[in-house]
Image: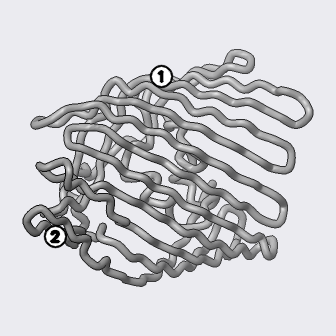
Amino acid sequence: TSPLAGVINDVTTQLAFWQHRAGPATIKVGRNPLPRGLLNEVRYIGTVLPFFRVPFEISGDAFDAVDGVVVSSRRDLGRGFVLEGHGHFGGSENRSVRATASELTVRASRAHNMLGAQGYLDAPGGVRLGLFANKYERRTPQQSGFRNFVGYSGQIDRSFGVLRAEHFRESGESPGADLKSGYVQAVARVHLRLHVAGEHIRQTQRVFFDDTRLNTDVPSVRETGAAINLFGPPGTVFKFEHRWRKGYTYDAFVPPTTLSGNTVRVNPALSTTYWIASVAVSF
């Protein structure tokens, strides 16, 4: 029943690339994992994720791979500091669901001429800092325009747990877009076979009108999740999580705003709760 069901093929190719390493540098050609943030490259490896999926408001649907070239390099700076860089060029699938002022829209397109980079700085104490920048051309049969994507990441990974946070902003034109998304996530390693996790997700989107003076920022998503991870046989994780969600982005249309004359009113957000039970296996 998802609005995305009509724009996703029954069979898809997630990744298929050729890789060559030459000293500290690596080049990948094909459909490569897109180096973006802390979790994008491992979003399909459920055994390393504390929840069923990476926060959807950060990862989206698609925009996970780049059809083109990724060049990477890693340099040891000494004293426990390591600098890592990834540059990419090519294209990507781009699908999203947005609640506009009047309807729920499914936006499926190709990201063309995508050029960007992801940098990481690893520091002592399990600290990892990241900066992502990307620009691409979004084309549809009706409209086209350029989008800018900027992201900031931070993580502390110690033996007793992990604390990570990320913030991304996508802005551009045709149709207009200004989307700010972020999350904070913590994992406590209570026992070798028991982890407890929590996260909070926030997303703000701009609702556009013909009269641009009426454009309004709406808190489209506020979601909190808590999970228990139970580790069974090697490579197996059972996850039980509860989610509290408030906002306007659901499978059915929930109008975020009401226009009355020259006045825009932000409508009350809807709330819901749900459970997810899942098992992940890797080998």
Q: Which image quarter: residue 176?
A: top left
- Secondary structure found at label 2: strand
Task: Give the residue type at disc 2.
Answer: Thr
Q: Secondary structure at mark 1?
A: strand
The image quadrant where one finds the C terminus is: bottom right
Residue drawn 79% across the image and 75% down it: 190
- State which mark lies toward you, 2 or 1: 2
Residue 195, image x, y percentages: 71, 73
Task: Please give the residue where the numbered disc 1 appears in the rendered image.
Answer: 69
Residue 212 screen position, x and y as percent = 19, 48
Q: Which label was assigned to residue 258?
A: 2
Closer-to-camera residue (216/80): 216
Is 257 placed left or right of 149 in the picture? left
Query: Residue 56's spot in the image, x, y percent?
Result: 43, 59
Which one is nearer the viewer's eye here, 185 or 101? 101
> Which residue sits at x=13%, y=49%?
211
Vertical relation: 231 (above or below) 112: below
Looking at the image, which residue is at 43% across and 25% down? 115
Q: Which mark is residue 162?
A: none
Relative to 97, 142 lies left or right = left
Residue that appears at 43% across and 58% down: 57
Q: Quadrant of the N terminus?
A: bottom left
Q: Residues within 10 Å of mark 1 (few under 14, many from 20)?
A: many
- Residue type beneath disc 1: Val
